[in-house]
Amino acid sequence: HPDSMQNFEMKDLLLASGSDQIILKNGNPYANKMQGCSNSFTPEILVGFEDRLLALGMTGHLDADPVKRGDLYHLETADLRSKLVSQADAVVIVPHTESRSLDAIRTIQPHGIEIYNFHANIDPKIRVDSLHVPPFKNIPGFLTFLVDPYGELNPDFAFLNFLEMHSAYFQTWNSLISGGLRVSGFGGSDSHENVFPQFASDGERLDSHRRVMRIMSNHLLVTNVDADEAKQAIRTGQGWTVFEGLGSPVGMDFYASFGNTTVGVGQTGTLGGASATITVKVPVLYSESPQGGESPIIRLTLKQVLTEGKDKVVATAEGKDIQYQTSTPGAYRAEVEIVPKHLRDFLGTFSSQADKEFTWIITNHLYLDP
């Protein structure tokens, strides 16, 4: 949040220590390649903030005066969006879109919006005021993980008690897309350790950063593991949101082909009177994802965005790829549902959740122009 970062300079906000490698941009601290992980992966962190706007990958502050920049970061204006982009090379996203008007989002012209938010999913007040759903639905099951005297439950799977998609996000997203704003959609973990301070049976907060950050992630399509490429993929919607707690997918793909042209997610193709074949590849579980004795059921859905916040299902498939032929221009996205039977062995008294269908992957759109 701005109050937590406005008084610190970029080099301090990168949290570098030990043998960490600071990456410079235009001579200024920009990213931190963190060393010391137990495997070969090297995390790279950049600076940003969350307030009424979400700024990702900033190259510097907007003002040398901490008070002035703090005042700026609390705003929700097109001017702030412009300054973040032009002066700090930031990616600008509108968080908590369940509480934002379409007019406000259109005015800001963000690169992306949240289509899922962990905090909003469980906060009783947000659920009632913005999502218009019962405030405490499934919370009792979630809190069962606090009363587990024999340590029989794995609290990392507590999220299955509340994980659900809400139509408000998709009505907003559909409306923006159909109105011509090609805005990317992202899942937000909103991890601040400010929801459930109580400790679960594993001795860790129910809302610990480690636990919450494992629930979902945003997969980006890049050719190099590079911060600038990642930011560009976010700007253009080249990727998808994955509810990683259900398992990590391998082999997911989504594209349209016509003639010698292939259009990937986040990209645009011109039909020119021809028809296109839209392909959605069925993903499988990564070999190191938790897997018991059963196999999951995986279902694919292809949707076309309509007007006035609506979309329609144009193709489905279970356990196999979608290949849908169309000559209809528009914006299309893929969604993947999963019945996580592979998790039954890890769910204890909540084993029946392995028979429920959950959203696993939501892609951004690909666009077919006339």
Image (cartoon, grey):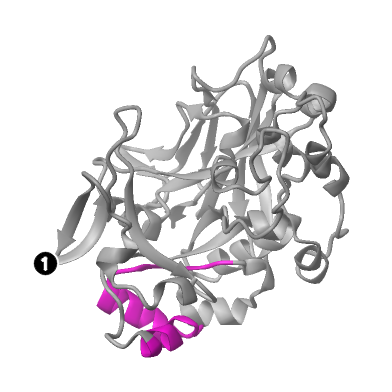
- Which residue occupies the extreme top position in the image? 293
- Which residue occupies the extreme left position in the image? 27
The x and y percentages for residue 89 are 28, 70
Span shown in magenta: 67-95
Q: Is residue 188 magenta?
A: no
* Helix, strand or loop at mark 1: loop
User: In the displayed structure, does residue 166 sit left or right of residue 279?
Assistant: right
Residue at point 75% right, 61% down? 123
Residue 93 vertical placement versus 138 (above, below): below
Residue at point 76% right, 26% down? 151
Characterize the magenta stretch by its predominant secondary structure: helix
- Asked if one can make out residue 121 in the rendered structure from this viewpoint, the answer is yes
User: In the displayed structure, does residue 126 sit left or right of residue 244?
Assistant: right
Which residue carries the number 1 mark? 27
Count of number-bearing discs: 1
Q: Quadrant of residue 78?
A: bottom left
Q: Nearer the viewer, residue 113 or 202?
A: 202
Q: Is residue 79 magenta?
A: yes
The x and y percentages for residue 279 are 48, 33
Q: Nearer the viewer, residue 54 or 276?
A: 54
The x and y percentages for residue 283 are 52, 26
Residue 97 vertical placement versus 32 (above, below): below
Quadrant where the C terminus is found in the figure: bottom left
Q: Nearer the viewer, residue 118 or 4?
A: 4
User: In the displayed structure, does residue 318 sit left or right of residue 286?
Assistant: right
User: In the displayed structure, does residue 155 sit left or right of residue 45?
Assistant: right
Residue at point 34% right, 77% down? 84
Q: Quadrant of residue 224?
A: top left
Q: Hey, what amino acid is under mark 1? A: Gly
The x and y percentages for residue 312 are 68, 50
